[in-house]
């Protein structure tokens, strides 16, 4: 058949045993994880609203910090969004590194990635500093036509929550 019935109902969330086993396997494999592994796994747990535990999240934050220069813009955004959604502070080493990545390569970030990254910084209560926020705000201001209303609203909310007020109007 052209449209087979999915094996699980829509909205299905795997049982706790599967999620716990997946978290344990991810932690065991963390030393060889590449940025996409880290980003996708964290995103999956966050999307399912399943907190996999501080030991895994701390290990993921350490590995992400070590491999951050290889992160693509979407991996930066997904990793930040995941930690914020899970309510887990990954620590300054990772946040500082990802903030620097965002500032240096903001032109390669899609609007949703910019918006999600700013939202995550605000949700985590982490200010990446005026240099980073200046670079990101300037990029947003120069590409407003590419942003959806939701992306723009989230970006502006995050800047306000971070108590950042650009000197020039966006």
Image (cartoon, rainbow, N blue to C red):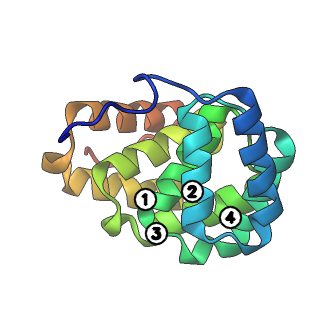
Q: Along the horizontal axis of the image, is 15 left or right of 120?
A: right
Numbered mark located on residue 64 in the image: 4
Q: Which residue is drawn at 21% across and 37% down?
A: 3
Q: Which residue is label 1 attached to?
A: 74
Mark 1 or 2: in front is 2
Q: Residue at x 38, y 51 (%)?
A: 114
Measure the alpha-carbon separation of dots 2 and 3.
Answer: 10 Å
Mark 1: which secondary structure?
Answer: helix
Numbered mark located on residue 72 in the image: 3
Q: Picture quarter containing residue 52?
A: top right
Q: Can residue 162 be seen in this view?
A: no
Q: Residue at x 77, y 43 (%)?
A: 21
Q: Position of residue 130 (x, y in %)?
A: 53, 55
Label 4 with label 2: CB-CB less than 8 Å: yes
Q: Along the horizontal axis of the image, is 104 left or right of 23?
A: left
User: Quadrant where the C terminus lies?
Assistant: top left
Measure the alpha-carbon separation of dots 1 and 2.
Answer: 9 Å
Measure the alpha-carbon separation of dots 3 and 1.
Answer: 6 Å
Q: Where is residue 117 in the image (x, y as percent from the top left)?
A: 48, 48
Mark 2: which secondary structure?
Answer: helix
Q: Which residue is drawn at 83% across and 41% down?
A: 54
Mark 4: which secondary structure?
Answer: helix
Q: Position of residue 44 (x, y in %)?
A: 56, 43
Name above or below for residue 58 compared with residue 18. Answer: below
């Amino acid at each position: 058949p052209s449209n087979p019935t999915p094996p699980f109902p829509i909205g299905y969330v795997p049982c706790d045993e599967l999620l716990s086993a997946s978290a344990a396997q991810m932690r065991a494999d963390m030393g060889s994880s590449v940025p996409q592994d880290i980003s996708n796994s964290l995103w999956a747990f966050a999307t399912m609203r399943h907190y996999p535990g501080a030991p895994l999240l701390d290990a993921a934050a350490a590995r992400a910090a070590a491999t951050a220069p290889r992160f693509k813009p979407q991996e930066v955004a997904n990793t930040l969004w995941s930690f914020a959604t899970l309510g887990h502070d990954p620590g300054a080493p990772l946040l500082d590194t990802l903030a620097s990545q965002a500032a240096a390569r903001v032109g390669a970030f899609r609007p949703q990635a910019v918006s999600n990254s700013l939202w995550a910084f605000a949700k985590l209560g982490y200010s990446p500093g005026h240099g980073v926020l200046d670079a990101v705000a300037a990029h947003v201001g120069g590409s407003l036509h590419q942003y959806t209303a939701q992306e723009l609203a989230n970006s502006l909310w995050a800047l306000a929550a971070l108590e950042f007020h650009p000197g020039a109007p966006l």
